Image (cartoon, coloured by chain):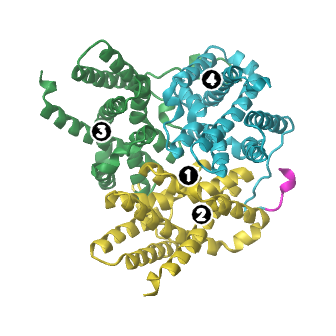
Chain colours: A yellow, B green, C cyan
Amino acid sequence: MPYTDPQLVHTLQVILEFLGTFAFAISGIRHAAQKHFDWFGGYVCGFAVAIGGGTIRDTMLGVRPFWMTDIMYVLCTALALLLVILSRKWIRRLRNAWFVFDTLGLALFTIAGIQKTIALGHPFWVAVIMGCITGVAGGVIRDVLLNNVPVIFHKEIYAMASVAGGLLYWVLLALGLPLPLTVVVTFLTICIIRFIAVGYHISLPTLHGENEKKREKRH
Amino acid sequence: MPYTDPQLVHTLQVILEFLGTFAFAISGIRHAAQKHFDWFGGYVCGFAVAIGGGTIRDTMLGVRPFWMTDIMYVLCTALALLLVILSRKWIRRLRNAWFVFDTLGLALFTIAGIQKTIALGHPFWVAVIMGCITGVAGGVIRDVLLNNVPVIFHKEIYAMASVAGGLLYWVLLALGLPLPLTVVVTFLTICIIRFIAVGYHISLPTLHGENEKKREKRH
Amino acid sequence: MPYTDPQLVHTLQVILEFLGTFAFAISGIRHAAQKHFDWFGGYVCGFAVAIGGGTIRDTMLGVRPFWMTDIMYVLCTALALLLVILSRKWIRRLRNAWFVFDTLGLALFTIAGIQKTIALGHPFWVAVIMGCITGVAGGVIRDVLLNNVPVIFHKEIYAMASVAGGLLYWVLLALGLPLPLTVVVTFLTICIIRFIAVGYHISLPTLHGENEKKREKRH
């Protein structure tokens, strides 16, 4: 099976990780630009999205944050900032590409988070949570820094795609599927859930305050 | 003395921890509901209140976050979310119960934080701070995620009940009181301070900006 | 050379650290006062500015947070709170002193962060980031707690003075300068950049949203 060739898998993973990191950084910088942050603020927001989730995960797992051993993440964010400064038009025109790369990043980082947590000997339910944190916590930090309500708490399904992928990964391995197949199926499932959620504007149900009249219909 | 019977103490502690965790999770989800978060956002806010303080404490103490070894906290938050989704009326009607359980949680988590810090060999003043962080930092994370100003910084006395309890715990042990009695007295003191503060709307004095006229009277 | 006398260097460092910590705490409490936080909220904001950056650094480096081994930081923040409560007039009159002390703190904490990171065996680019985090992250936490957009992301150059100092430190050591001279030159450079930036209102360029018309002139 071609997807088990180690060289190909490694190359693919490096490309995916670069694209995902780049798209995450772009997301942070674009949001910062809408609030008129300066270049430094844009860089910090981009870096926070790119490395925030994995850093929280590694801190809770008690290991060295992953970005401290590879300058790639620092440079990738700098490249993203340069691109946003040089060409807003280009950034806007490529917004569908950013969306696709961002989804690839979500799927990849979720799986990376799960695998790292399992490798350190934690139970699977911890791994599902850590996978979700790896994929989505950076965006929450971005929104906190921008003084916004975190978008993943009230928009289209995003974090639940990560959680669903994590649960599927668990089930597939428990059913005895080989690891490479489990990874590929999980990866595609997360991407497909996200694409469908955005394409059809599918959100989770919303909570309501206790003193509001019933008005579920309007939401 | 009955309160030193190990079996009873353990059972009581498990019940109190469940009630406290449940009340903390309910608090996060209710606040999320007022901002129309979706189910995932409500879960995250509830979980953040339930485990946020202890997680910050454990990260600073350099030990594994407590919730990663017991799935109870994850399930307890899910139960709280289910309850909020199924019956807003019931949640509102029981608000006095949530207040009492929340206060029990504050007292219990404060003492748990102090004892864990002392057990790891830190001085007592660090333990008082860690006890306070264990009891109140989850609520601060909730307010940050909700894009609100943290309520404990300008409402009725909450964190100071935890700090006062921590200082009392220190004094009582220094005076040679047995540990069980110290725990019980501290627990009750924190609860009583909180009940009095809310019953009589007692707050700490407020700070004022430098360019404001004197108007302490109106506050 | 007088600046290499160990006793003098140590005394100078203790004085600078106290002044810097005090100015950082004052900054947090003054901002909290403008939002009418109570005394506890003011203390937490002051403490967050004083120890927040170093605590994030130490957590990522996997070592015990520095303030947990020395009660000075807790007492220094209490002193700052007392001063703000007792005399708003005095606080306002001394605002130039706070600005100078804050700048000394920024320079000192940046260098302390770099040296601690290098001592733990990390590469220099990690040290520059950790130096910047040590110097500026406390102020970001303050702004998040106050529900403000972090001021260092859109005001006069602050964090970039820290980054520039960190890069200079790296270059000077690589060029073979002795450590004491490197420290002094870096310290003065950070202070001078900050003084010039505030004196002449020099900011980094601002990012712009993608749907805005060009209006760089007005910024």
Give the labeled residue for mark 3: B20
At 22% across and 35% down in the image, what residue appears?
B13
| Residue B185 rendering spot, x and y as whole percentages | 27, 20
Report how far apart the C-alphas of labels 4 and 1 lie in the structure.
30 Å
Under mark 1, the amino acid is Ile
- Foreground label between 3 and 1: 1
To which chain does the residue with label 4 belong?
A: B
To which chain does the residue with label 1 belong?
A: A
Give the labeled residue for mark 1: A141
| Residue C134 rendering spot, x and y as whole percentages | 62, 39
Which residue is at the front of the view, C45 or B144? C45
Quadrant location, the N terminus of chain C = top right
Q: Is residue B47 left or right of residue C100?
A: left
What span is in magenta?
Answer: C213-219
- Foreground label between 2 and 3: 2
Under mark 3, the amino acid is Gly
Under mark 4, the amino acid is His
Q: Secondary structure at mark 3?
A: helix
Question: Which of the two discs, 3 and 4, labels the residue nearer the N terminus?
Answer: 3
Q: Secondary structure at mark 1?
A: helix
Question: Which of the two discs, 1 and 2, labels the residue nearer the N terminus?
Answer: 2
Splitting the image into 4 quarters, where does residue A91 fall?
Answer: bottom right
